[in-house]
Amino acid sequence: VTVMRARATSLARTAHRQTVHRVISIRRATAHARASHAMAMRFIDVGANMMDDMFRGMYRGKRAHDDDTGAVLARARAVGVEKIIVTCGTLEEARSGVEMVRESRMINASIGPELYATVGVHPTRAYAFRDDPEGADAHVAKLLRVAEDGARDGAIVAIGECGLDYDRLEFCDAETQREAFARHFELARAVGLPMFLHMRGGGEYVVIDDFVDILSVNAEGLTMCVVHSFDGSLSDAERVLAVAPGRVFIGVNGCSLRSEANIDVIRAIPLDAMVLETDAPWCGIKRTHAGYVHLDLPPEHFPLAVKKEKHVPGETLVRDRNEPAHALAVAQIIAGIKGIDVNIVADVTYRNAQRVFFAQQMIE
């Protein structure tokens, strides 16, 4: 009896070990498959603020860590981000953006995503036209020179970020914003580039009517455009898309996925009308956001997030700092919301972004 009990115990232990090994093997296989899954996908982050000081390690004028731009770009490439469009919101930023893109072609060509940039004036900075010593027309001409120069070698791929922001009228009044928004269509037509648009304001001053009016009046001759960081209602989305069907797209990032109301809107918008963006270092996805439940990020590419002062470039993430690599997170949430495979989301939105911003590359 003792021998039989010992044998039974031994068999039970063996079976337990085998079960544990099977579980570990399954987990490892799942992790490997998940990593391969991410690697196989391709993304274009159509809007990231890569010139923000946070990527230089500076926060409100104080250094918290070393410049980690290289590590940020390498991480993005590791999860499948092939292209990043660097958002510019002033004339000076646009000039710097062109320089950054051209430098990246020499420095990061083999390890990072391809960088491109925009030319435009953010609505909260629209006083730049009025305040230019040479006048508003001269400011438009300066923007045009940057756009033409950048378009020649493909460094500039869009006009923007421009539009209306009625949530922050303390920075610039509505009338000035509307005038500046309209001037950007002159630039877009002159260089034949798509537009990267900003629309914010659903409180006391509702933005949708003015935005749609200006877009509609100027739709003729417009190639394509993206209404970025969309967080409006389904009605807002439908009105914007109806201005120029097939030529207007909705940019989705973490700010588009915060509430249950946001989730319902994204569920209803056709995937064919979407492109992905991060708006990094802003618009990150937090645990409190409604879309967070759909996240399943591979830990090998998304290490521990720590306070900025404890950040080790290449080894950790900065807590609450968004990155282009999180384009994968946006895709996962959209897939979860719509009940489809994340590969489909990645493929469709990639092709949409190619069509909007890189149509010439598709032809070539």
Image: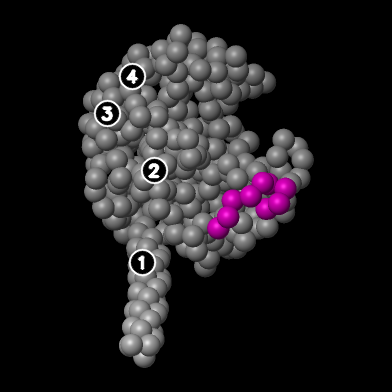
Residue 20 occupies which quadrant of the picture?
bottom left
Q: Quadrant of residue 26?
A: bottom left
Question: Residue at the spot x=36%, y=45% of the render?
Answer: 294
Q: Which residue is mark 1?
A: 30
Give the Cα distance between marks 4 and 1.
46 Å
Classed neighbour count for the residue bearing mark 4: other residues with Cα under 10 Å, few (<14), some (14–19), many (≥20): some
Q: Nearer the viewer, mark 2 or mark 4?
A: 2
Mark 1 / mark 3, whichever is N-terminal:
1
Q: Is residue 209 above or below residue 56?
A: above
Q: Earlier in the sequence, mark 2 or mark 4?
A: 4
> Which element carries disc 2, helix, strand or loop?
helix
Q: Which residue is mark 4?
A: 212
Pointer 2: what residue?
293
- The disc, 4 or 1, on the residue closer to the chain's N-terminal end is 1
Q: Which residues are magenta?
A: 303-311
**Distance (Cα) linking label 3 and label 4:** 10 Å
Q: Secondary structure at mark 3?
A: helix
| Residue 30 versus residue 338 in the image, above or below | below
Q: Residues within 10 Å of mark 2 (few under 14, many from 20)?
A: few
Q: Earlier in the sequence, mark 2 or mark 1?
A: 1
Quadrant holding the C terminus: bottom left
SS at mark 1 in the image: helix
